[in-house]
Image (cartoon, rainbow, N blue to C red):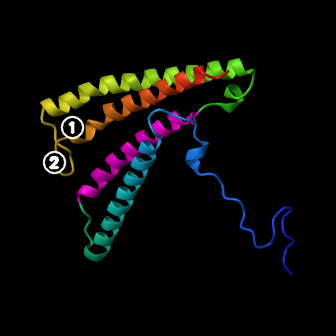
Amino acid sequence: MSSPPHAGHAPEDPPEALPPLDDLDEPVRVPLKIEDGLTVLVMGALALITFANVIARYFTNQSFAWTEEFSVFLMIVLALVGSSAAVARDRHIRIEYFSDSGSMARRKNLSRLGAVLVALLFALIGVLSIRLVWDDYRFNETSPGIGIPQWWYSIWLPILSIGIALRAVGLFIRRGRWS
């Protein structure tokens, strides 16, 4: 025995499709597809590196020396890119009891305060990490695993931190437009 059809649908009608996730995002000047694409690329690279290392260990009882170093780097990049997407979508960590209660003016002000604090934090991280990159470059620091220049890894911290700060500034501006 089959279940009865839903009201308004004939049994052979396909269910309505959910809107794509991009349709759920509020409009931004710099497309969120940048973070989404980077996330896919980084996760794909992590999966390929890990799979190659597992296969190498299985057949040779040895691992590739570079996989751990690249994997750690890619996980840090993934965390920063994900943070940028979360800030742009206003889905960063917060205590919803406080952020989602009260009047619209209170929620707007809390959202803007959060955006300002995130922007300040990541701008500070970006500026201070420039010194780290400069020191890695100036002192010819090399990575511990495979000996490539350390600044190849550390250059991404200020770049991605400033990107997160800019996304937070954009969120601050968008939250100022609420009526």
Q: Residues within 10 Å of mark 2 (few under 14, many from 20)?
A: few
Range of magenta residues:
65-93
Assign the magenta stretch its main secondary structure: helix
- Crowding around mark 1 (Cα neighbors within 10 Å: few <14, some 14 to 19, many 20+) is many
Identify which residue is drawn at 50% across, 21% down.
117
Nearer to us of marks 1 and 2 is: 1
Is 38 placed above or below 83 here?
A: below
Q: Could you tell whether 15 is left or right of 174 in the image?
A: right
Q: Is residue 116 above or below residue 73?
A: above
**Residue 63: image x %, image y %?**
26, 65
Q: Is residue 4 left or right of residue 107?
A: right
Quarter the C terminus occupies: top right
> How far across and how far down the image is residue 99, in percent?
67, 27
Relative to the observer, which residue lies in front, 117 or 17?
Answer: 17
Identified at 16% across, 33% down, the residue is: 137
Task: Indicate which disc residue 147 carries.
Answer: 2
Q: Residue at position x 55%, y 46% from top?
A: 22
Residue 21 in percent (x, y) is at: 58, 48
Quadrant position of the N terminus in the picture = bottom right
